[in-house]
Amino acid sequence: MRKVLFLLLALGAVSALVAYQIYNKPHRHAEGKPYVSIHAHELYDLFTADENQANENFLDKVIQVNGTIAEISLNQDDRQVILLQSNDPLFGISCTLEKTDRKISKGDVIHVKGICKGYLSDVVLTDCVIINP
Amino acid sequence: MKKVLLSLIICVLYLQASAQANYMTRNGQISFFSKTSMENIDAVNNEVTSIINTGTGEIVYAVLVKSFRFEKALMEEHFNENYMESDKFPKSTFSGKLTNLSAIDFKKNGSYPATVEGDMTIHGIKQHVTASGTIVVNGNKISITSTFSIKLADYKIEVPSLVAEKIAESIEVKVNCQYEPKS
């Protein structure tokens, strides 16, 4: 009888711990091998040509994009946002950086890894990290 | 000849004026807040794209559902998968017009109360809405703030009865965008 009670208690404790861990599971980061490595021009063209297809391919995936920095700005959470050039003079790939730990400037060619969130007038990546400046 | 020249000049001036009339941001902020006695939930999106045409008063907002950030990753997952179905409906949009455009002088610094009217699309459902806010003009920068509430039922966002007590029926939405002239 005691054994059963102990087992039940242990089971209860374990499931409480698991539930707590699921409740507090960490946010995703752009970690691991990217789903695809692609040039900014190509990614932008894929989204403008067929948004639904591109969403199906890239949404929520960690992707690596290489391109030239067209613009650097700060968002309202003081995070750096990089716009990578596309074939369109006004729009491109907007990459919100997870942290600012590198010196970058307009015109730099960089590789960025981030999570693809979809397409507005730019293709949007968030939680980005710069792989090599 | 003089007349032709004059109309040409007017034409060029007009073109310049309309070219300068577009202001844009791609880093605007939209947040929302759900308050119940059981739980408070808030989420922020810093990747809002918005364009306002100060000549016509037309204003457009677009936001990607997947880029709302919650405090808890699990809430973010439920928001995307169970409520907003963001794989199926990746973006929410508003497209409308300022209804009191004549009361706002975009060439003069100051703070102006503003009202908009237009179509809001969330979760694939389009609704005609009105909202009020404030437009602040400061040099060649414009900022717009607005607070309004939306009812989940209006956009067919269904909350299972099991968690219904934790999620408010009406959600408070805050918009805060800083625009620059579109080059």
Image: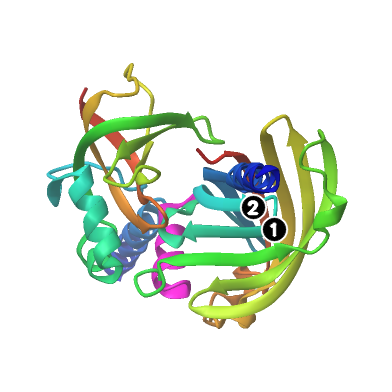
The single residue placed furthest to the top in the displayed view is: A103
Along the viewing direction, whichever of A100 and A82 lies nearer the viewer: A82
Q: Position of residue B15 (x, y in %)?
A: 60, 47
Q: Mark 1 — residue?
A: B56
Graded by Cα atoms within 10 Å as few (under 14), some (14 to 19) or many (20 or more), the crowding at tag 2 reads some
Query: Disc 2 vs disc 1: Cβ atoms closer than 8 Å?
Result: yes
Tell whether B73 sits left or right of B26. Answer: left
Q: Mark 2 — residue?
A: B53
The residue type indicated by label 1 comes to Thr
Q: Position of residue B8 (x, y in %)?
A: 62, 46
Colouring method of the image: rainbow
**Could one spot residue B44 in this view of the protein?**
no
In the picture, the quarter occupied by the N terminus of chain B is: top right
Q: Quadrant of residue A56?
A: bottom left
In reply to whether residue B13 is colored magenta, the answer given is no
- Identified at 58% across, 38% down, the residue is B181
The residue type indicated by label 2 comes to Asn
Along the viewing direction, whichever of B90 and A24 lies nearer the viewer: B90
Q: Secondary structure at mark 2?
A: strand
**Could one spot residue B145 in this view of the protein?**
yes
Chain on which label 1 sits: B
Q: Secondary structure at mark 1?
A: loop
* Residue bounds of the magenta highlight: B70-85
